[in-house]
Amino acid sequence: MSEEPLPGGFVGAAVRVGATVRKAPPADAVFVRRLLGFFAERGWSGAPRSLGVDEFGREVLSFVDGEVPWGAGAPPVGDEALAAVARLVREFHELTAGSVLAGGQEVVCHHDLSPGNTVFRGGLPVAFIDWDIAGPGLRVQDVAHVCWQFVPLGPGVAVVDAVRRVRVVAEAYGWGDLSLLVETVLWWQDRCWRGIEAGAAEGVPAMVRLRDAGVVGAVRSAYEWTVCHSARLGR
């Protein structure tokens, strides 16, 4: 069957083959397979299904039909969809809370929630994709990542709109501590640009591509913007 390249590919390229997606195995492929299997056992449709490995050693996942906003030109999701994203995050957090997969942490986190990793139908989110770096973590880590990527938080965003949309996320998820939420956004942004810079300095191809695409500068600018407006965002 023919292979159709899917958007993205800075870190890991993926192709569509019929009703499946093929991609290189993640660093902890066993954990990701167990997690996707856990979701399937519980009938949660918000993630693709793990279908094994193909003859080339690639992960085989079910293809989730819908639209995935990709690239800098994609418009921000509306408030209704933003609230639905937060509720979808709450669903898989509640499923994994207290499970063996959470490994003593609060929940299993996706750790890379963004519009480019979300499938929409009719303008509303139906599934998250690219669970490659999922792992045990704190609820606030995913909620903060949603705020950073979906609100979004960074230059060019009106502060009054950012404040309102952070509250949309927090209220839809059921998160009350806005100050901790903003602190965790800053933690993510700082960790991201430093991680890309360090990986690029070590010659990691994916990190070199991200650095050369200007991602380090963009994330640093987002961090500085969030620091500047953190007091308003966290009230």
Image (cartoon, helix red, strand yellow):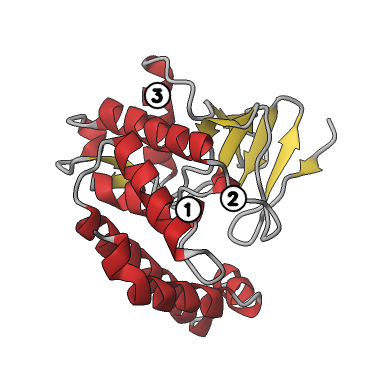
Disc 2 element: loop
| x and y, in percent, of residue 217 in the image | 54, 80
Q: Residue at x 49, y 57 (%)?
A: 152
Pointer 3 local density, CA inside 10 Å: few below 14, some 14–19, many at least 20: many
Disc 1, disc 2: CB below 8 Å?
A: yes
**Which one is in front in this view, the residue at disc 3 or the one at disc 1?**
1
Pointer 1 local density, CA inside 10 Å: few below 14, some 14–19, many at least 20: many
Disc 1 element: loop
Instruction: Indicate which disc residue 39 carries.
Output: 3
At label 3, the amino acid type is Phe
Instruction: Indicate which disc residue 76 carries.
Output: 2
Disc on the earlier residue, 1 or 2:
2
At label 1, the amino acid type is Val
Q: Residue at x 44, y 80 (%)?
A: 198
Q: Residue at x 66, y 39 (%)?
A: 22
Q: Residue at x 38, y 70 (%)?
A: 226
| x and y, in percent, of residue 100 in the image | 21, 32
Quadrant containing the C terminus is bottom left
- The front one of 200 and 45 is 45
Q: Which residue is mark 1?
A: 151
Q: CA distance from mark 3 to mark 1?
A: 27 Å
Residue at the extreme left of the image, as rendered: 104
Q: Is residue 199 visible?
A: no
Pointer 2 local density, CA inside 10 Å: few below 14, some 14–19, many at least 20: some
